[in-house]
Image: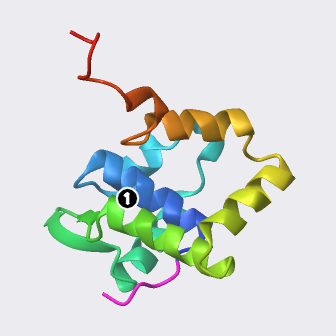
Amino acid sequence: MTRARLSKAETRILEQCWKLGTCSVREILESLPEEERVAYTTVQTLVYRLEQKGALRKVKKIGNAQLFEPAIDQTEFRGGLVRDLLDLFGGSPRLLVSNLLESGRITLKDIKALQSAAPGGKSNRGRGGKGNA
């Protein structure tokens, strides 16, 4: 599939489909938090757009209800978003993180926590060595 850009609303509907698995428009609507609920026809339009873009696929019809399932993997989708974001910063993760730091969206404490949680991070060093028996 050629990766089509999804609107924020389309992405929100796709996220619900990842949570629900195979689902109908009504189930998607009912799964949204009360403050995010919109008209049934709005969700229906978004679902059909996602189908046209190849993000959802029709799997079955029960009575008048169409059932849909995600046609794209959540991990691949998010990876594509990260690649797009990095492209905006010339492919430089350092430039991206620097911008996040300057804007206050991430702190040095956050970065240290991520570094410790990463494979081979500070908190993982020395495990299995002397004195860790």
Q: Quadrant of the C terminus?
A: top left
Question: Residue 33: x and y, percent?
Answer: 55, 38
Please name the residue shown 29% across and 10% down the image.
Answer: 131
127 above or below 111? above
The quarter of the displayed image where residue 100 is located:
bottom right
Query: Is 2 in the magenta?
Result: yes
Please name the residue shown 52% across and 67% down the image.
Answer: 82
Q: Is residue 7 visible?
A: yes
The residue range painted magenta reads 1-5
Question: Residue 98: x and y, percent?
Answer: 75, 59
Q: How is the image coloured?
A: rainbow
Q: Is residue 26 visible?
A: no
Q: Quadrant of the N terminus?
A: bottom left
Please name the residue shown 40% across and 68% down the image.
Answer: 77
Question: Along the line of sight, which residue is nearer the eye, 73 or 91?
Answer: 91
Please name the residue shown 35% across and 60% down the image.
Answer: 74
The quarter of the displayed image where residue 127 is located:
top left
